[in-house]
Amino acid sequence: MQALNAVAGLRSLKSIIATASSARVLDLHALASEELDDPDYAEQPMFIHPVLNRSIIIKHNLRSGEADRLPPGRFSATKVIFPFDLTDLNLGGQWLFVGQRNFVAALARHLDYTNMSMDRDVAVLRVLDRLPTLDPFLIRESLLRQNIEVGRCYYRFSESDRAEMLGFVAGEIEALVQLCFGKSKGNEERMQRLSQLLLSNHESTELEPLRETFRLEPAQFSEAMFSWKAFLYYRWRSRALSAALKSTMSSISAIRAGRHERDELAFVIRAKQLVQKTVTNSWREVGQRLKLYDDAFASLTGLGDPETFRTFLVHSSSLFIELGERIGRLEQVVGFWSDRFGDQRAAGSSPDDVLGGMRDLLQAMSLELAPRPTRPASDLGLLSAAG
């Protein structure tokens, strides 16, 4: 275990949590103090061990000296933090990386699993580690694919995300409110209230008219609202990602060729092309999946047809993993490039730094350059003679 101490110059756990995004931090510590009375919290826990079930789990971009603790080819890791004091996060805590050397042994040394099996907890941690982010929808669908059921209360937004999303969601559902009430003076308040209800961690009877409109049983309606919340969340994240991704691709494109040796130049050019093609294809796929949602929602607000939107929400959960993984992988690319080169454009970095950055990026994206084609000797001779 490594100590995460709150010393001058380092952000405390408390400040990390205060500004955390749902995609980066799974704050089980806060959940433990807020949801203890929820039956699902105890009956369907995220982790069996109570200490692990109130830990703080973070997707962490690896820094210099940390990568050697994990298998090669990674630029991010899943860090599990155990706070020293349950009432004062400023005191820091101890942590380990999921998948580090002797990971299971280290976990067993820190937590007493006497009279309980640690297999399920390790399985959940490994699922979280395979994911690019910790967004609640991606976690839920990934765990369900492993037949691991966890209470709904564990899948929620961070407070910072919720606050930022409220205005965005209000704008997204403006057409729905106008469809129901026309252009009324009270629509602003209605949009704000419906936004709060959609982003809430708890179900509300105020949504009963919507359930009746969709003609869904309570359990089906709950799942449909979860789906709707997911698509609003991914739509919101995609807008923030768009500008960051554009900046990252511009930085990669601006790498100057003349500063590299011939072989290095050939590698950098081909690596740039492969990264750009892969990112472009992934971004296009994100757009295609979000358009399915847009079209279904437009059938409700534009045509007054609730059936198409209802059917989409009921049967769209398979899109969560596809959307979450693609957006998460693209966010990893942005995070890696930003951490490696900071605010300095890659074009101004040394050839060695750029070369190392491109190699690490390819490895982290699980990309390989195809062997360069070679011409037969006879062809080379003909070309030489023609020249």
Image (cartoon, rainbow, N blue to C red):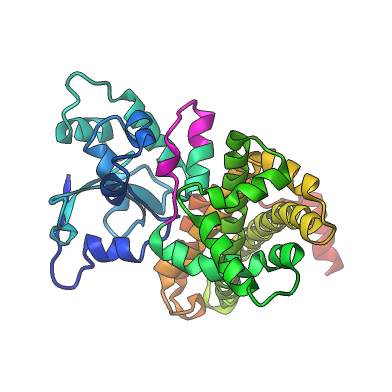
- Which quarter shows the C terminus? bottom right
Image-based side of 298 in relation to 234, left or right: right
Q: Is residue 299 visible?
A: yes
Residue 117 percent coordinates (x, y): 27, 21
What are the residue bounds of the magenta stretch?
142-157
* Residue at the image point whose x is 66% and y is 77% from the top: 185
Q: Above or below — where is 73 with respect to 345?
A: above
Q: Quadrant of residue 129?
A: top left
Q: Nearer the viewer, residue 52 or 266?
A: 52
Left or right, 195 with respect to 177, comes to: left
In percent of width and height, residue 265 lies at 58, 68
Residue in the picture at 41% in, 67% down = 340
Residue 298 sits in quarter: bottom right
Residue 262 can be seen in this image: no
Q: Residue at x 60, y 67 (%)?
A: 190
As for residue 233 lying within the magenta part, the answer is no
Q: What count of labels does the image hold?
A: 0
